Image (cartoon, rainbow, N blue to C red):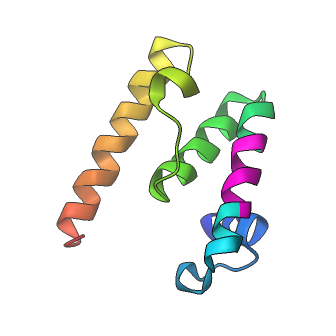
Amino acid sequence: MDFDDQLRRYFGTADLAAIHAQAHAAGTERMRVDFGLETNPGRRFALWALMYMLGVAPDLDVAFKDESERDTARDFMDMADRTGAEDGR
């Protein structure tokens, strides 16, 4: 899944700064629905990762029933947070 393609799919633009509040709410809701319906573990994780980066991801215990998936998600969170800290975010 390409990040820009996913932004376009859910928000109509790849420019995060151009997403209006209503478009953000609608796109977030579509992501949550798709996440709940997705059965492919890889696509499901990718969608969760996108939601995490946008600050709208469900809690790990809600998102992932399997402990190994939660561990992978924690690893991703740590990596993303480290990268953000290195970039000065």
As drawn, which residue projects farthest toward the front?
A: 22
Q: Quadrant of residue 1?
A: bottom right
Q: Where residue 79 sits in the image (x, y, percent)?
A: 30, 47
Q: Quadrant of residue 38?
A: top right
Span colored in magenta: 26-33
Q: Is residue 50 a member of the stretch shown in magenta?
A: no
Q: Is residue 28 a member of the stretch shown in magenta?
A: yes
Compared with residue 61, is residue 22 higher up or lower down, i.e. above or below?
below
Q: Where residue 16 sits in the image (x, y, percent)?
A: 55, 78
Write the residue at 71% across / 62% down. Answer: 27
Compared with residue 13, is residue 78 higher up or lower down, i.e. above or below?
above
As drawn, which residue projects farthest toward the bottom?
A: 18
Write the residue at 70% across / 72% down. Answer: 23
Compared with residue 3, is residue 63 higher up or lower down, i.e. above or below?
above
The main secondary structure of the magenta stretch is helix
Write the residue at 62% across / 79% down. Answer: 19
Q: Where residue 31 sits in the image (x, y, percent)?
A: 71, 50
